[in-house]
Image (cartoon, coloured by chain):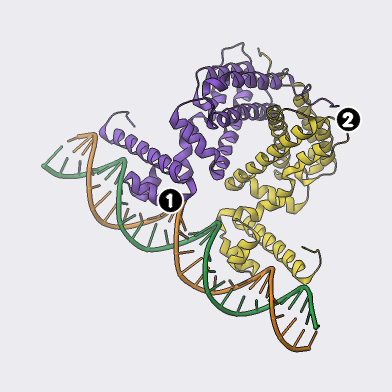
Chain colours: A yellow, B purple, C green, D orange
Amino acid sequence: MTQQNGLRERKKQRTHETISNTAIALFFEHGYDQVSITQVADAAEVSRRTLFSYFPSKEDLVTHRLADHETESARVVRGRPSGQSPLDALREHYLDGLARRDPITGLTDLEPALMLYRLILETPSLAGGMLKFKDNGERALAEALRDTAGLPDFTARLAAAQVMAVVWTLSLANREAVVAGAGADAVYPDAVAAAEAGFAQLASGLGVVAAEHP
Amino acid sequence: MTQQNGLRERKKQRTHETISNTAIALFFEHGYDQVSITQVADAAEVSRRTLFSYFPSKEDLVTHRLADHETESARVVRGRPSGQSPLDALREHYLDGLARRDPITGLTDLEPALMLYRLILETPSLAGGMLKFKDNGERALAEALRDTAGLPDFTARLAAAQVMAVVWTLSLANREAVVAGAGADAVYPDAVAAAEAGFAQLASGLGVVAAEHP
DNA sequence: GTATAACTTGCACTCAGTCTACTTATGCAC
DNA sequence: GTGCATAAGTAGACTGAGTGCAAGTTATAC
Protein backbone atom coordinates (compact mmCIF):
# COMPACT_ATOMS: atom_id res chain seq x y z
CA MET A 1 0.00 0.00 0.00
CA THR A 2 0.97 3.63 -0.13
CA GLN A 3 2.93 4.03 3.06
CA GLN A 4 3.71 7.43 4.49
CA ASN A 5 7.40 6.56 4.81
CA GLY A 6 9.84 4.97 2.41
CA LEU A 7 12.30 6.96 0.36
CA ARG A 8 10.22 6.55 -2.74
CA GLU A 9 7.07 7.97 -1.21
CA ARG A 10 8.85 10.87 0.42
CA LYS A 11 10.63 11.72 -2.79
CA LYS A 12 7.39 11.64 -4.73
CA GLN A 13 5.75 13.95 -2.27
CA ARG A 14 8.65 16.35 -2.43
CA THR A 15 8.64 16.33 -6.22
CA HIS A 16 4.92 16.96 -6.21
CA GLU A 17 5.35 19.99 -3.99
CA THR A 18 8.38 21.27 -5.84
CA ILE A 19 6.57 21.20 -9.14
CA SER A 20 3.47 22.89 -7.76
CA ASN A 21 5.43 25.59 -5.91
CA THR A 22 7.66 26.27 -8.87
CA ALA A 23 4.65 26.53 -11.15
CA ILE A 24 2.69 28.88 -8.94
CA ALA A 25 5.71 31.11 -8.41
CA LEU A 26 6.32 31.32 -12.15
CA PHE A 27 2.66 31.88 -12.95
CA PHE A 28 2.45 34.55 -10.32
CA GLU A 29 5.51 36.32 -11.67
CA HIS A 30 4.80 36.20 -15.41
CA GLY A 31 1.11 35.34 -15.67
CA TYR A 32 -0.49 31.94 -16.12
CA ASP A 33 -0.88 32.20 -19.88
CA GLN A 34 2.65 33.50 -20.39
CA VAL A 35 4.30 30.47 -18.83
CA SER A 36 4.44 27.16 -20.67
CA ILE A 37 4.44 23.70 -19.20
CA THR A 38 7.94 23.25 -20.58
CA GLN A 39 9.19 26.25 -18.62
CA VAL A 40 7.64 24.91 -15.44
CA ALA A 41 9.17 21.49 -16.01
CA ASP A 42 12.59 23.00 -16.69
CA ALA A 43 12.43 25.20 -13.62
CA ALA A 44 11.34 22.28 -11.44
CA GLU A 45 14.04 20.10 -12.99
CA VAL A 46 11.81 17.31 -14.16
CA SER A 47 10.88 16.25 -17.64
CA ARG A 48 7.68 17.48 -19.21
CA ARG A 49 6.39 13.94 -19.20
CA THR A 50 7.02 13.51 -15.49
CA LEU A 51 5.22 16.73 -14.75
CA PHE A 52 2.17 15.31 -16.47
CA SER A 53 2.40 12.16 -14.43
CA TYR A 54 2.03 14.27 -11.29
CA PHE A 55 -0.56 16.71 -12.59
CA PRO A 56 -3.07 15.76 -15.25
CA SER A 57 -3.32 19.29 -16.64
CA LYS A 58 -1.81 22.75 -16.45
CA GLU A 59 -4.82 23.96 -14.51
CA ASP A 60 -4.27 21.30 -11.89
CA LEU A 61 -0.88 22.79 -11.05
CA VAL A 62 -2.81 25.64 -9.49
CA THR A 63 -6.15 24.23 -8.46
CA HIS A 64 -5.23 20.88 -6.92
CA ARG A 65 -4.84 22.56 -3.55
CA LEU A 66 -8.49 23.45 -3.47
CA ALA A 67 -9.73 20.11 -4.74
CA ASP A 68 -9.71 18.61 -1.26
CA HIS A 69 -12.38 21.05 -0.20
CA GLU A 70 -14.65 20.21 -3.07
CA THR A 71 -16.87 18.00 -0.96
CA GLU A 72 -16.46 19.84 2.32
CA SER A 73 -20.10 20.94 2.53
CA ALA A 74 -21.26 17.42 1.85
CA ARG A 75 -19.00 16.07 4.61
CA VAL A 76 -20.28 18.66 7.06
CA VAL A 77 -23.86 17.68 6.36
CA ARG A 78 -23.11 13.97 6.65
CA GLY A 79 -21.16 14.41 9.86
CA ARG A 80 -23.52 16.75 11.67
CA PRO A 81 -24.75 15.82 15.15
CA SER A 82 -28.17 14.22 15.09
CA GLY A 83 -30.90 16.69 15.75
CA GLN A 84 -29.12 19.50 13.96
CA SER A 85 -30.52 20.71 10.66
CA PRO A 86 -28.23 20.60 7.63
CA LEU A 87 -28.51 24.34 7.24
CA ASP A 88 -27.52 25.00 10.84
CA ALA A 89 -24.58 22.65 10.52
CA LEU A 90 -23.37 24.44 7.41
CA ARG A 91 -23.87 27.87 8.93
CA GLU A 92 -22.00 26.92 12.06
CA HIS A 93 -19.19 25.35 10.09
CA TYR A 94 -18.83 28.37 7.86
CA LEU A 95 -18.77 30.85 10.72
CA ASP A 96 -16.25 28.67 12.47
CA GLY A 97 -14.13 28.69 9.31
CA LEU A 98 -14.22 32.48 9.28
CA ALA A 99 -13.20 32.64 12.93
CA ARG A 100 -10.31 30.24 12.29
CA ARG A 101 -9.35 32.24 9.19
CA ASP A 102 -9.64 29.04 7.19
CA PRO A 103 -8.31 29.96 3.74
CA ILE A 104 -11.19 28.13 2.09
CA THR A 105 -13.55 30.86 3.32
CA GLY A 106 -11.41 33.37 1.47
CA LEU A 107 -10.55 35.04 4.74
CA THR A 108 -6.82 34.63 5.25
CA ASP A 109 -3.58 36.56 5.47
CA LEU A 110 -1.36 33.65 4.49
CA GLU A 111 0.79 34.73 1.61
CA PRO A 112 0.65 31.45 -0.35
CA ALA A 113 -3.13 31.42 -0.25
CA LEU A 114 -3.31 35.07 -1.29
CA MET A 115 -1.04 34.39 -4.24
CA LEU A 116 -3.27 31.55 -5.28
CA TYR A 117 -6.41 33.66 -5.04
CA ARG A 118 -4.90 36.58 -6.89
CA LEU A 119 -3.75 34.23 -9.63
CA ILE A 120 -7.14 32.60 -9.98
CA LEU A 121 -9.11 35.83 -9.85
CA GLU A 122 -7.07 37.47 -12.56
CA THR A 123 -6.86 34.45 -14.86
CA PRO A 124 -10.17 33.79 -16.62
CA SER A 125 -9.35 30.23 -17.59
CA LEU A 126 -8.55 29.36 -13.98
CA ALA A 127 -11.63 31.14 -12.64
CA GLY A 128 -13.68 29.20 -15.16
CA GLY A 129 -12.14 25.96 -14.00
CA MET A 130 -13.12 26.69 -10.44
CA LEU A 131 -16.77 26.60 -11.44
CA LYS A 132 -16.39 22.88 -11.87
CA PHE A 133 -15.42 22.59 -8.23
CA LYS A 134 -18.51 24.49 -7.25
CA ASP A 135 -20.59 22.23 -9.43
CA ASN A 136 -19.07 19.04 -8.05
CA GLY A 137 -19.53 20.33 -4.53
CA GLU A 138 -23.14 21.04 -5.29
CA ARG A 139 -23.71 17.52 -6.55
CA ALA A 140 -22.04 15.99 -3.51
CA LEU A 141 -24.08 18.21 -1.21
CA ALA A 142 -27.28 17.20 -2.97
CA GLU A 143 -26.46 13.55 -2.35
CA ALA A 144 -25.67 14.22 1.28
CA LEU A 145 -28.97 16.01 1.75
CA ARG A 146 -30.84 13.23 0.03
CA ASP A 147 -29.12 10.54 2.08
CA THR A 148 -29.12 12.12 5.52
CA ALA A 149 -32.10 14.45 5.55
CA GLY A 150 -34.49 12.20 3.72
CA LEU A 151 -35.23 14.77 1.05
CA PRO A 152 -36.54 13.67 -2.33
CA ASP A 153 -33.88 13.82 -5.00
CA PHE A 154 -35.06 16.92 -6.77
CA THR A 155 -35.72 18.84 -3.58
CA ALA A 156 -32.22 18.00 -2.44
CA ARG A 157 -30.71 19.23 -5.68
CA LEU A 158 -32.63 22.46 -5.47
CA ALA A 159 -31.58 23.06 -1.89
CA ALA A 160 -27.96 22.13 -2.58
CA ALA A 161 -27.85 24.54 -5.50
CA GLN A 162 -29.07 27.39 -3.34
CA VAL A 163 -26.74 26.63 -0.46
CA MET A 164 -23.68 26.31 -2.66
CA ALA A 165 -24.60 29.51 -4.46
CA VAL A 166 -24.64 31.39 -1.18
CA VAL A 167 -21.50 29.84 0.30
CA TRP A 168 -19.60 30.38 -2.93
CA THR A 169 -20.71 34.00 -3.19
CA LEU A 170 -19.68 34.64 0.40
CA SER A 171 -16.23 33.14 -0.09
CA LEU A 172 -15.70 34.89 -3.40
CA ALA A 173 -16.50 38.24 -1.81
CA ASN A 174 -14.03 37.52 0.98
CA ARG A 175 -11.33 36.56 -1.48
CA GLU A 176 -11.89 39.73 -3.44
CA ALA A 177 -11.71 41.91 -0.35
CA VAL A 178 -8.59 40.24 0.95
CA VAL A 179 -6.84 40.20 -2.41
CA ALA A 180 -7.63 43.91 -2.75
CA GLY A 181 -5.43 44.44 0.26
CA ALA A 182 -7.74 44.58 3.24
CA GLY A 183 -6.34 42.41 6.04
CA ALA A 184 -8.32 39.38 7.11
CA ASP A 185 -8.96 40.85 10.56
CA ALA A 186 -10.31 44.04 9.05
CA VAL A 187 -12.67 42.13 6.77
CA TYR A 188 -13.81 39.66 9.44
CA PRO A 189 -16.74 41.64 10.90
CA ASP A 190 -18.21 42.28 7.45
CA ALA A 191 -17.65 38.68 6.48
CA VAL A 192 -19.53 37.46 9.53
CA ALA A 193 -22.38 39.86 8.89
CA ALA A 194 -22.54 38.80 5.24
CA ALA A 195 -22.55 35.13 6.21
CA GLU A 196 -25.32 35.65 8.74
CA ALA A 197 -27.33 37.53 6.16
CA GLY A 198 -26.72 34.87 3.53
CA PHE A 199 -27.75 31.99 5.73
CA ALA A 200 -30.73 33.93 7.02
CA GLN A 201 -31.81 34.42 3.44
CA LEU A 202 -31.42 30.72 2.80
CA ALA A 203 -33.58 29.90 5.79
CA SER A 204 -36.34 32.39 5.30
CA GLY A 205 -36.16 33.45 1.70
CA LEU A 206 -35.65 36.45 -0.48
CA GLY A 207 -39.15 37.59 0.44
CA VAL A 208 -38.03 40.77 2.11
CA VAL A 209 -35.23 41.52 -0.26
CA ALA A 210 -37.07 40.98 -3.46
CA ALA A 211 -40.42 42.36 -2.43
CA GLU A 212 -42.16 44.94 -4.53
CA HIS A 213 -40.19 48.09 -4.67
CA PRO A 214 -41.26 51.75 -4.83
CA MET B 1 -22.78 49.50 -41.26
CA THR B 2 -23.58 45.81 -41.14
CA GLN B 3 -26.75 45.67 -43.19
CA GLN B 4 -29.07 42.70 -43.07
CA ASN B 5 -29.04 42.39 -46.84
CA GLY B 6 -26.20 42.37 -49.34
CA LEU B 7 -24.81 39.23 -50.87
CA ARG B 8 -21.80 39.31 -48.59
CA GLU B 9 -23.87 39.37 -45.40
CA ARG B 10 -26.22 36.66 -46.55
CA LYS B 11 -23.33 34.48 -47.56
CA LYS B 12 -21.66 34.95 -44.22
CA GLN B 13 -24.79 34.01 -42.39
CA ARG B 14 -25.21 30.91 -44.47
CA THR B 15 -21.62 29.88 -43.95
CA HIS B 16 -22.01 30.41 -40.23
CA GLU B 17 -25.01 28.13 -40.12
CA THR B 18 -23.52 25.56 -42.42
CA ILE B 19 -20.43 25.23 -40.26
CA SER B 20 -22.40 24.99 -37.04
CA ASN B 21 -24.89 22.47 -38.42
CA THR B 22 -22.18 20.34 -39.95
CA ALA B 23 -20.23 20.39 -36.71
CA ILE B 24 -23.16 19.43 -34.50
CA ALA B 25 -24.18 16.65 -36.83
CA LEU B 26 -20.64 15.24 -36.86
CA PHE B 27 -20.24 15.60 -33.11
CA PHE B 28 -23.57 13.96 -32.54
CA GLU B 29 -22.67 11.05 -34.78
CA HIS B 30 -19.12 10.34 -33.62
CA GLY B 31 -18.81 12.16 -30.30
CA TYR B 32 -17.40 15.61 -29.65
CA ASP B 33 -13.93 14.47 -28.70
CA GLN B 34 -13.65 12.07 -31.62
CA VAL B 35 -14.15 14.76 -34.24
CA SER B 36 -11.38 17.22 -35.03
CA ILE B 37 -11.72 20.81 -36.19
CA THR B 38 -10.10 19.79 -39.45
CA GLN B 39 -12.79 17.21 -40.09
CA VAL B 40 -15.50 19.77 -39.42
CA ALA B 41 -13.84 22.28 -41.73
CA ASP B 42 -13.49 19.70 -44.48
CA ALA B 43 -17.09 18.58 -44.15
CA ALA B 44 -18.32 22.18 -44.18
CA GLU B 45 -16.08 22.92 -47.16
CA VAL B 46 -14.23 25.82 -45.63
CA SER B 47 -10.64 26.12 -44.56
CA ARG B 48 -9.64 25.49 -40.97
CA ARG B 49 -8.62 29.10 -40.74
CA THR B 50 -12.01 30.35 -41.90
CA LEU B 51 -13.78 28.17 -39.41
CA PHE B 52 -11.87 29.89 -36.66
CA SER B 53 -12.84 33.27 -38.00
CA TYR B 54 -16.48 32.30 -37.51
CA PHE B 55 -16.12 30.49 -34.21
CA PRO B 56 -13.43 31.37 -31.69
CA SER B 57 -13.19 27.84 -30.33
CA LYS B 58 -14.36 24.30 -30.85
CA GLU B 59 -16.73 24.65 -27.92
CA ASP B 60 -18.40 27.62 -29.53
CA LEU B 61 -19.46 25.48 -32.46
CA VAL B 62 -21.91 23.89 -30.08
CA THR B 63 -22.64 26.46 -27.42
CA HIS B 64 -23.04 29.67 -29.42
CA ARG B 65 -26.74 28.97 -29.83
CA LEU B 66 -27.28 29.26 -26.12
CA ALA B 67 -25.12 32.33 -25.66
CA ASP B 68 -27.98 34.65 -26.59
CA HIS B 69 -29.89 33.53 -23.54
CA GLU B 70 -27.01 34.20 -21.19
CA THR B 71 -28.47 37.48 -19.99
CA GLU B 72 -32.11 36.58 -20.34
CA SER B 73 -32.83 36.74 -16.62
CA ALA B 74 -31.19 40.13 -16.38
CA ARG B 75 -33.28 41.42 -19.28
CA VAL B 76 -36.47 40.11 -17.69
CA VAL B 77 -35.69 41.92 -14.46
CA ARG B 78 -34.81 45.14 -16.23
CA GLY B 79 -37.88 45.04 -18.42
CA ARG B 80 -40.44 44.13 -15.78
CA PRO B 81 -43.54 46.28 -15.34
CA SER B 82 -43.18 48.78 -12.52
CA GLY B 83 -44.70 47.55 -9.32
CA GLN B 84 -43.75 43.93 -9.99
CA SER B 85 -41.04 42.36 -7.87
CA PRO B 86 -38.02 40.93 -9.66
CA LEU B 87 -38.79 37.49 -8.33
CA ASP B 88 -42.37 37.58 -9.57
CA ALA B 89 -41.19 38.74 -12.97
CA LEU B 90 -38.72 35.88 -13.20
CA ARG B 91 -41.22 33.33 -12.00
CA GLU B 92 -43.83 34.48 -14.47
CA HIS B 93 -41.33 34.52 -17.30
CA TYR B 94 -40.11 31.05 -16.50
CA LEU B 95 -43.59 29.55 -16.26
CA ASP B 96 -44.45 31.24 -19.52
CA GLY B 97 -41.34 29.73 -21.08
CA LEU B 98 -42.46 26.28 -19.95
CA ALA B 99 -45.94 26.82 -21.38
CA ARG B 100 -44.45 27.97 -24.69
CA ARG B 101 -42.05 25.00 -24.65
CA ASP B 102 -39.20 27.44 -24.98
CA PRO B 103 -36.13 25.24 -25.49
CA ILE B 104 -34.15 27.33 -23.03
CA THR B 105 -36.28 25.91 -20.20
CA GLY B 106 -35.15 22.47 -21.28
CA LEU B 107 -38.73 21.57 -22.12
CA THR B 108 -38.92 20.95 -25.84
CA ASP B 109 -39.53 18.29 -28.42
CA LEU B 110 -37.60 19.99 -31.20
CA GLU B 111 -35.08 17.56 -32.55
CA PRO B 112 -32.20 20.05 -33.04
CA ALA B 113 -32.49 21.24 -29.46
CA LEU B 114 -32.63 17.70 -28.15
CA MET B 115 -29.49 16.82 -30.10
CA LEU B 116 -27.76 19.80 -28.60
CA TYR B 117 -28.79 18.89 -25.08
CA ARG B 118 -27.84 15.26 -25.47
CA LEU B 119 -24.47 16.29 -26.81
CA ILE B 120 -23.81 18.71 -23.98
CA LEU B 121 -25.02 16.40 -21.24
CA GLU B 122 -22.83 13.53 -22.36
CA THR B 123 -19.71 15.59 -23.06
CA PRO B 124 -18.03 16.72 -19.84
CA SER B 125 -15.96 19.45 -21.46
CA LEU B 126 -19.09 20.99 -22.96
CA ALA B 127 -21.06 20.69 -19.75
CA GLY B 128 -18.18 22.39 -17.97
CA GLY B 129 -18.20 25.18 -20.48
CA MET B 130 -21.89 25.78 -19.85
CA LEU B 131 -21.10 26.70 -16.27
CA LYS B 132 -19.52 29.88 -17.59
CA PHE B 133 -22.85 30.86 -19.11
CA LYS B 134 -24.53 30.33 -15.79
CA ASP B 135 -21.88 32.43 -14.11
CA ASN B 136 -22.14 35.25 -16.63
CA GLY B 137 -25.90 35.18 -16.35
CA GLU B 138 -25.58 35.42 -12.61
CA ARG B 139 -23.36 38.45 -12.85
CA ALA B 140 -25.69 40.18 -15.29
CA LEU B 141 -28.66 39.43 -13.06
CA ALA B 142 -26.85 40.83 -10.04
CA GLU B 143 -26.29 44.07 -11.91
CA ALA B 144 -29.89 44.22 -13.00
CA LEU B 145 -31.05 43.72 -9.42
CA ARG B 146 -28.67 46.35 -8.16
CA ASP B 147 -29.72 48.85 -10.81
CA THR B 148 -33.45 48.35 -10.86
CA ALA B 149 -34.35 47.14 -7.39
CA GLY B 150 -32.05 49.43 -5.47
CA LEU B 151 -30.33 46.56 -3.70
CA PRO B 152 -26.84 47.05 -2.29
CA ASP B 153 -24.22 45.36 -4.41
CA PHE B 154 -23.53 42.38 -2.18
CA THR B 155 -27.19 41.73 -1.46
CA ALA B 156 -27.85 41.75 -5.20
CA ARG B 157 -25.06 39.27 -5.83
CA LEU B 158 -26.34 36.96 -3.16
CA ALA B 159 -29.88 37.09 -4.48
CA ALA B 160 -28.74 36.64 -8.09
CA ALA B 161 -26.70 33.60 -7.14
CA GLN B 162 -29.69 31.97 -5.48
CA VAL B 163 -32.08 32.75 -8.30
CA MET B 164 -29.72 31.50 -10.99
CA ALA B 165 -29.03 28.37 -8.99
CA VAL B 166 -32.72 27.56 -8.90
CA VAL B 167 -33.49 28.44 -12.51
CA TRP B 168 -30.48 26.48 -13.71
CA THR B 169 -31.41 23.45 -11.64
CA LEU B 170 -34.97 23.53 -12.93
CA SER B 171 -33.86 23.71 -16.56
CA LEU B 172 -31.22 21.05 -16.11
CA ALA B 173 -33.79 18.68 -14.65
CA ASN B 174 -36.10 19.34 -17.60
CA ARG B 175 -33.33 18.72 -20.09
CA GLU B 176 -32.45 15.47 -18.41
CA ALA B 177 -36.04 14.27 -18.41
CA VAL B 178 -36.62 15.21 -22.02
CA VAL B 179 -33.32 13.77 -23.22
CA ALA B 180 -34.17 10.55 -21.41
CA GLY B 181 -37.07 10.22 -23.80
CA ALA B 182 -40.07 11.61 -21.96
CA GLY B 183 -41.98 13.92 -24.27
CA ALA B 184 -42.20 17.59 -23.37
CA ASP B 185 -45.96 17.40 -22.83
CA ALA B 186 -45.55 14.48 -20.47
CA VAL B 187 -42.95 16.32 -18.42
CA TYR B 188 -44.79 19.63 -18.39
CA PRO B 189 -46.92 19.13 -15.27
CA ASP B 190 -43.91 18.04 -13.21
CA ALA B 191 -41.86 20.89 -14.60
CA VAL B 192 -44.49 23.41 -13.57
CA ALA B 193 -44.75 21.92 -10.10
CA ALA B 194 -40.97 21.94 -9.74
CA ALA B 195 -40.76 25.54 -10.87
CA GLU B 196 -43.47 26.61 -8.46
CA ALA B 197 -41.69 24.80 -5.66
CA GLY B 198 -38.36 26.33 -6.61
CA PHE B 199 -39.63 29.87 -6.74
CA ALA B 200 -41.60 29.36 -3.54
CA GLN B 201 -38.39 28.25 -1.90
CA LEU B 202 -36.63 31.32 -3.17
CA ALA B 203 -39.33 33.54 -1.78
CA SER B 204 -39.78 31.99 1.61
CA GLY B 205 -36.66 29.99 2.24
CA LEU B 206 -35.49 26.50 2.89
CA GLY B 207 -36.87 26.77 6.41
CA VAL B 208 -39.35 23.99 5.99
CA VAL B 209 -37.22 21.79 3.81
CA ALA B 210 -34.08 21.97 5.88
CA ALA B 211 -35.65 21.96 9.29
CA GLU B 212 -34.53 19.54 11.95
CA HIS B 213 -35.27 16.04 10.96
CA PRO B 214 -36.33 13.02 12.99
C1' DG C 1 -14.66 48.90 -64.95
C1' DT C 2 -11.68 49.51 -61.65
C1' DA C 3 -10.08 50.50 -56.86
C1' DT C 4 -10.88 49.11 -52.40
C1' DA C 5 -12.12 46.86 -48.57
C1' DA C 6 -13.72 42.48 -46.75
C1' DC C 7 -13.37 37.72 -46.83
C1' DT C 8 -10.75 33.42 -47.59
C1' DT C 9 -6.85 30.47 -47.77
C1' DG C 10 -2.43 27.96 -47.02
C1' DC C 11 1.38 27.52 -44.30
C1' DA C 12 4.13 27.64 -40.53
C1' DC C 13 4.13 28.14 -35.74
C1' DT C 14 3.23 27.47 -30.42
C1' DC C 15 1.51 24.97 -26.84
C1' DA C 16 -1.14 21.26 -24.17
C1' DG C 17 -1.47 16.69 -23.70
C1' DT C 18 -0.51 11.57 -25.09
C1' DC C 19 2.17 7.36 -26.68
C1' DT C 20 6.10 4.37 -26.94
C1' DA C 21 10.35 2.63 -26.05
C1' DC C 22 14.25 3.14 -23.09
C1' DT C 23 17.00 4.18 -18.81
C1' DT C 24 17.55 4.81 -13.92
C1' DA C 25 16.49 4.30 -9.13
C1' DT C 26 14.28 1.87 -5.28
C1' DG C 27 12.60 -1.89 -2.39
C1' DC C 28 13.19 -6.35 -1.11
C1' DA C 29 14.83 -11.29 -0.75
C1' DC C 30 18.62 -13.59 0.21
C1' DG D 1 26.19 -6.35 0.25
C1' DT D 2 24.23 -8.56 -4.50
C1' DG D 3 20.71 -9.31 -7.67
C1' DC D 4 16.31 -8.78 -9.44
C1' DA D 5 11.46 -7.16 -10.11
C1' DT D 6 9.28 -3.10 -10.51
C1' DA D 7 8.19 1.76 -10.07
C1' DA D 8 9.53 6.21 -11.59
C1' DG D 9 11.69 9.20 -14.85
C1' DT D 10 13.38 10.59 -19.61
C1' DA D 11 13.61 11.51 -24.62
C1' DG D 12 11.41 12.38 -28.61
C1' DA D 13 7.87 11.93 -31.87
C1' DC D 14 2.97 12.73 -32.47
C1' DT D 15 -2.01 14.80 -32.45
C1' DG D 16 -5.08 18.55 -32.18
C1' DA D 17 -6.47 23.36 -30.84
C1' DG D 18 -5.64 27.83 -31.74
C1' DT D 19 -2.84 32.06 -33.87
C1' DG D 20 -0.09 35.13 -37.09
C1' DC D 21 0.94 36.39 -41.53
C1' DA D 22 1.09 37.21 -46.34
C1' DA D 23 -0.96 36.37 -50.59
C1' DG D 24 -5.12 35.42 -53.20
C1' DT D 25 -10.08 36.16 -54.25
C1' DT D 26 -14.56 38.43 -54.43
C1' DA D 27 -18.37 41.73 -53.39
C1' DT D 28 -19.21 46.42 -53.38
C1' DA D 29 -18.63 51.55 -54.00
C1' DC D 30 -17.64 54.93 -57.10
- Mark 2 residue crowding within 10 angstroms, few (<14) / some (14–19) / many (20+): few
Give residue B79's quadrant in the image: top right
Tell me the residue at 53%/25% (across/down).
Answer: B107
Where does residue B189 sit, x and y in percent of width and height?
Answer: 59, 18
Depth order, front residue of C13/A158: A158
Depth order, front residue of B189/A199: B189
Disc 2/disc 1 C-alpha distance (Å): 54 Å
Q: Type of residue at label 1?
A: Ser
Task: Identify the chain of the residue marked 1, using the numbered disc in the image.
Answer: B
The secondary element bearing badge 1 is classed as: loop
Q: Type of residue at label 2?
A: Gly
| A139 horizontally vs A200: left or right | left
| Numbered tag placed on residue B36 in the rendering | 1
**Vertical relation: C18 (above or below) B100:** below
| B44 horizontally vs B127: left or right | left
The secondary element bearing badge 2 is classed as: loop
Q: Which residue is mark 2?
A: A83
Where does residue B167 sit, x and y in percent of width and height?
Answer: 61, 26
Where does residue B24 sit, x and y in percent of width and height?
Answer: 43, 40
- Mark 1 residue crowding within 10 angstroms, few (<14) / some (14–19) / many (20+): some
Locate the N terminus of chain B and report the quarter of the image it occupies.
top left
